[in-house]
Image (cartoon, helix red, strand yellow):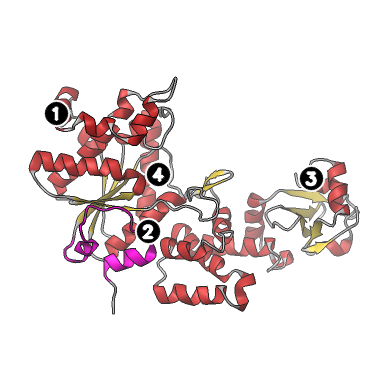
Amino acid sequence: MKTTLSEELTWRGFVNQSTFSDIAELDKRKFSFYWGVDPSSSSMTVGNLALAMMVKHFIAYGHKPYLLVGGATGLIGDPDGKTEERAIQSKEQIESNKKALGEQYKKLFAGSNFTLVDNLDWFKGYAYLDFLRDIGKHVPLSQMIGREFVQSRLKTENSGISYAEFSYVMIQAYDYFYLHKEHKVDLQVAGSDQWGNSIAGVDLIRRLSGDVTHVWTGPLVVNPQTGVKFGKSEQGAVWLDPKLTSPTAFYQFWVNAEDAAVEQYLKLYTLLDKAQIEAVMKQQNGQLKKDRPAQFKLADEVTTLVHGESLAASARRVTSYLTSSLDIATASHEDLASLREEIPFLKSSLGGSIIGALVASGLATSNTAARQLIGDGAVYINNQRVTKDHFESDDFTQGRLLLRRGKAYRDSALVELANA
């Protein structure tokens, strides 16, 4: 029996706060809904991707989507969750970011019938005094000043909050009102951090028209072991734009998912159904656990969704070379080019110094540190531990080898013969 939308969202973990007294109301009629991303950068992150996947389920069950790029709100920046004032980006940068986000919408929701909207279109001709009379008059100050992040910022010495950021909630509330008035949008879908802004829109619509509208929020994804907001790594955000996070690095981000979290990520970030996820988790919890089948399935599915099958296949092969699942000797010119983008590479010669290669590639900070690594048995060539100081002919196959420090396959370098 086919599940309902409320059941689908529940088992996948997309239920947080909503204005529905019974979430089964989602199954009784079709809503026109909107979801938006501000152009504070030129790309979404995997944090945005979780919400995009939630939106995909709304679309799959017949609800009508309006996808918003916040050309107006992006000029200010959402202050919620921020401890200090955002840096203002130029209008030219915001415009460039909008176009890039629009292309990501088109790629993520290819095959879906959606309407792309930009809130700058309805704000750019709205006179300031008219907006205050028409809208500001109906937004209670208590509603705005009572927000937790406003109170926190007001108490922060030498920080506070500007009028522009303070007014952000009113601007976003008008987005909902405008889309309701012009397009009959009656549901906003958002992340849990947008609950306050979204409710302000519901309240504004009620005050101005008497209509009842709704909000559905999904939880922000958090690593269950670290407590860190998902989409962040030690190096920063994991982007959907391949120029900011390469497809191979993107693929490996998922391969490295914690065992405790991988089932949750399969539910949130893939379109695999319940039976398919249960099957891969059965493999994960059985004899195949050491091979991390759930992580590799997750990486395959999400990378294909975001970057397409060709780039996902390339990322899969590059990862296989790094883990020695595939022999580096078999790598094509295209795969070698991708590998060089992921790890350091250098030229050496037969009899060349392994110590020098470790230092030149950044795998060791000095000759002394390199010798210590070799002495500790922490240096590998093509996944075989070495204790020697110089390369030999048997180390190279097809004129290349992989040099690694320790167990982490990311701590590798590609070494190629100078005359190969």
Q: Which amino acid is tagged 3? A: Ala
- Gap in Å between the C-alphas at discs 4 and 2? 19 Å
| Comes first in the chain, label 1 or label 2 | 2
Identify residue for label 2: 53
Residue 137 disc label: 1
Q: Position of residue 144 (x, y in %)?
A: 26, 32
Residue at (36% x, 67% y) in the render = 11
Tag nearer the camera, 3 or 4: 3
Q: Nearer the viewer, residue 371 or 314?
A: 371
Q: Which quadrant of the rendered structure holds the C terminus?
A: bottom right
Residue 328 disc label: none
Tell me the crowding category of disc 1: few under 14, some 14 to 19, or many 20 or more residues within 10 angstroms, Cα based.
few
Looking at the rendered structure, the secondary structure element under dot 2 is: helix
Q: Image check: 416 left or right of 100?
A: right
- Gap in Å between the C-alphas at discs 3 and 1? 64 Å
Tag nearer the camera, 1 or 4: 1
- Magenta span of residues: 4-30
Q: Position of residue 42 (x, y in %)?
A: 43, 41
Q: Which amino acid is tagged 2? A: Met
Q: Image check: 269 left or right of 61?
A: right
Picture mark count: 4
- Gap in Å between the C-alphas at discs 1 and 2? 37 Å
Identify residue for label 3: 364
Q: Are marks 1 and 2 in contact (CB under 8 Å)?
A: no
The answer to whether one can see residue 77 in this image is: no
Q: Nearer the viewer, residue 171 or 95?
A: 171
Q: Which amino acid is tagged 1? A: Lys
Identify residue for label 4: 100
Q: Nearer the viewer, residue 74 or 97?
A: 74
Residue 367 appears in which quarter of the rendering?
top right
Q: Which quadrant of the rendered structure holds the N terminus?
A: bottom left
Q: Are marks 3 and 1 in contact (CB under 8 Å)?
A: no
